Amino acid sequence: MEFSISKKAKTLTMTLMGVGVLFTAIGVFTSMSDHHFATRLLANGLVNSFFFFALGLGALFFLALQYATETGWYASVKRIIEAVAGFLPYGMGLLALTLLIITLNDGAHIYGWMDPESVNPKSHHYDEIIAGKAAYLNKGFFWIRTLVYMGTYYIFLRGFRMRSLAEDKIGGTEIHFKNYRKAAVFLVFFAVFSSTSSWDWLMSIDVHWFSTLYGWYTFAGMWCSAMVVLVLLTLYLKKLGYLPNVNDSHIHDLGKWTFATSFLWSYLWFSQFMLIWYANIGEEVTYYMMRIENFKALYFGMFLINFAFPMLILMSRDAKRHAGILTFVGLIILTGHWLDVYILVSAGSLGATAKIGFLEIGMALLVAGFFIRIILHNLTKAPLTPVNHPFLDESIHHEI
């Protein structure tokens, strides 16, 4: 069945983007005199470009995971996963543009290690710790890594998509097994790049600090957020009557993934916090001291949102099959993980001056509207049900 974007959906995306532009304009107008305005603007650009890029990357990871494990149930929702993953090129463009502007401004007080004065022994701003990391944290090597990450993701995304469309025409199992092999290779690259890219783009904001769990932590947030988007999009299309082969068991499986990844993120959040806080080593605990002293309600509130809501509401089987409950919890979780990325970026770059106002809300709504429009457009490019997937029959008769 072919999907077409309804006037209501078009209106929604345009409204989101319009409100986003308005709020952003108000935020810019009221904050231009702020000494930290430029840093705040670019920090918000980094928050939103990374967050929505991560949604596409999380979907690509989930698609590869299904290929590599030869899962059968997902065939009926495969095109939905592909549509979300298809935002990745746009997300990479937004993220690369943001990083480029920051780089051209010597870090813009976001990446302190990009300031040439920080590694100049003759400068009053010389930082011995940054100088000690200069072999890895320098502009040239940073951009080499960034381009390798993005190039690798794009190549695999394009390959999966082309083979998926070819499978509709050719059938058989040859393409399936090729996807199986390619997915296994992708997961190896992803296992490394998802961690090192989080070090480069996020952890290096707090350049004096590091955590060995950081890569896993950001990966878990990415995966959970992507699963929420997949749930919401599936429910939306199902409501419109576009997914006749998707039943309550498919919804249940997506709900279980959301529930499980929420607990994975919560476990990693607590593990990182508990180990550092209990050890109480000065150069480690300073990361949390700054966030707790200045953003206590937001920081712990974000954790409770992302942990408590799934635990208390999605525990039962019926809840994972209820469209209203999944939509409500999903929107809450998605907001909670946006706040997580906001704290990761803004608390490190702006410190105590970070705040959520018109600028933050406006930029988030603007990119969200763009994100939704691209996904809906991606859905129009191919039938919502893959025609010759070898596991399609198994997926159609999926019951748990």
Image (cartoon, rainbow, N blue to C red):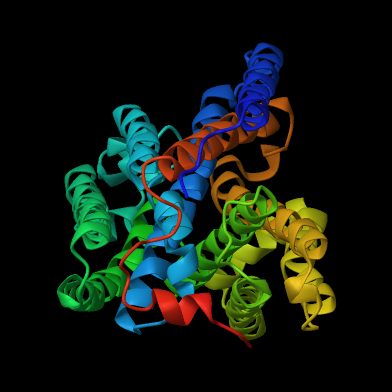
Task: Report which quarter residue 71 is drawn in.
Answer: bottom left
Image point 69% across, 33% down: which residue? 361
> So how many labels did they put on this image?
0
Point out residue 303 in the picture as x, y percentages from the top left corner. 73, 66
Residue 12 position (above or below residue 185): above
Residue at 53% across / 43% down in the picture?
Answer: 47
Q: Is residue 226 visible?
A: yes
Residue 123 in view of the camera: no
User: In terms of depth relative to the viewer, which is nearer, 264 or 7?
Assistant: 7
37 or 196: nearer the viewer? 196
Please tell me which residue is depicted at 35% across the width and 84% down the height of the picture: 69
* Viewer-proximal residue among 147 and 143: 147
**Residue 174 horizontal/vertical position (percent):** 15, 75
Q: Does 141 sit left or right of 305 as displayed? A: left
Residue, far bottom:
400
The one of 175 and 276 positioned closer to us in this rendering: 175
- Left or right of 240, for residue 193: left
Q: Quadrant of residue 111?
A: top left
Q: Locate residue 35, reporting x and y percent.
A: 60, 22
Q: Is residue 16 above or below residue 269?
A: above
Q: Position of residue 215 (x, y in %)?
A: 43, 70
Q: Quadrant of residue 5?
A: top right
- The residue that appears at 39% across and 51% down in the rendered structure is 201
Viewed as shown, does residue 211 lie left or right of 281? left
Q: Quadrant of the C terminus?
A: bottom right
